[in-house]
Structures are given as structure tokens and as C-alpha cells.
Image (spheres, rainbow, N blue to C red):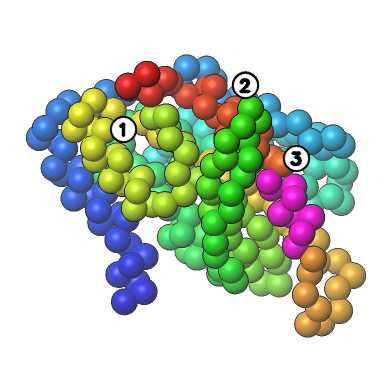
Amino acid sequence: MANIVRFAPAALLGVGCVLISGIRGQQRVPPSRPLATLQVNVPGYVARDTTVDVAEQKVAGMSHYLSRLYQRGPDSPGFGVYVGYYDMQVQGKSIHSPKNCLPGAGWEPLDVGVRTIAVPGGGSVRVNRFLLANKGAQAVVYYWYEGRGRVEPSEYVVKWNLIRDAARYGRTEEALVRIVVPIDMRGLQPGQRPNYDPADQLATTVAAQLVPGVKNVLPAPPNA
């Protein structure tokens, strides 16, 4: 039953793509500005852009991406930011849910939830919060979907909106935004629980900047 639920969003997307393929031609909608212009400023951290392997790009299917590491020094676990943008989603070329991809990469969820993030200028958004473990390493991951005027954590809502906007506007562009904060496990005794508060505080700070930042580099929503 759990496996059925896990793959339900992908199945819904597949059905939706088949349905919308005969309703309206889909537009490719590029970002309004390069994703590389996105800025996150956390005092003491230095940013370094990284490259996603060509084979991984082919599997992920994004049309544009930003992958960036932030560190305070060579021994700092730092944090990572990834924005994968799809200028058009069709069957076989759509956002892959981290709920499916991360376990496949060896990461197992220890805790899954949703956090509310206050954004500059007022208001708030809801994002997914995962605590993951892999061979003794742990990480806090925040991620959400952003595009066509929405910020949404739920895969089910995203797929429903995707089908609706494809039928109404012929637009399916969207971004997956992900923040990974590794947990510093150094100095812990066997069985000792890490303090996750600093990682959550850092991820919250970064998310509060990324939500409006990503909005500024994405195209205007179809009903703007």
C-alpha cells in the first residue's frame, strides 16, 4: 500500500499528461532571468556553483538548473541549494518528487513534515521538511514546488494544478526548489541524538530568501 501511495503523484501526472496532450498545445516558457542570478546571503558563507552530471540531467529532465554549495571553510558541512526548472512538462519530462528520488539514492526518511516559512514583506508559505539518514550521515532537507504564481509542498496539489493550467493556459512550467543542510555528527557519542535546531534555523533563513528570489527569476503567472 505504501508503494502505491508513493507513486501516486507520478501516476496522476502521467494520466494528466495523456489527457492534456489532446486538449491544448503546451508552451515552452523559459525563466525571465538566468537562475544563476539567484542570490542567497548568509553571513560567513561563500557560494560555489557546481555542475550536475550530464547523465543525471538526462534522467531529471530539467531545462535549466542552479546547483550551489555554501561553506564557511574547508571543514564546514555548509549547505546546498538546488533549483531545477522545467520550461514545459510532458510525459517522460517532468519534475521527479524527492520522496521517490532520495530513497533511491540511499537516503531514508527519519522524519517527514511540513514547515511554515515567513517571507519578507509579509505572508508565509508551507514547505516540506525531511530529516534523512544515509550510512551514518544525516541531513535536513526543505523542498517545495514553485511556479505559475504558487508555492506548494503537496505533490498531489501540484499535479492537479499542473493538469488544470495545462488545459486552461497551455502552460506547465515549474521549479523544484531544494535546500540540503548536512548535520554535523562530529563529537557525538554512540546513540546520542544530534541537535537539529541549527540546521532548521539555517534552512528557514535560506528558504525565506529563496521563495521571493525564485519568484523573481520565473516567468509571470498566466493570469497575472
> Where residue 122 sits: x, y (%)?
61, 32
Q: Position of residue 101 (x, y in %)?
A: 46, 57
Range of the magenta residues? Answer: 196-204
Distance, label 3 to label 1, CA atoms, is: 31 Å
Residue matched to label 1? 172
Q: Earlier in the sequence, mark 3 or mark 2?
A: 2
> Alpha carbon of mark 1 to alpha carbon of mark 2: how far?
23 Å
**Foreground disc of the pair 3, 1:** 1
> What percent of the width, then of the height, locates residue 38?
62, 26
Q: Residue furthest bottom?
A: 191
* Magenta segment includes 203: yes
Of tags 1 and 2, which is closer to the observer? 1
**Residue 187 x %, y %:** 89, 70
Amino acid at circle 1: Thr
- Up the image or down, 1 lies above or below 21; here it is below
Q: Amino acid at mark 2?
A: Thr
Residue named by callout 3: 70
Residue furthest to the front in view is 122
- For label 1, the SS is loop
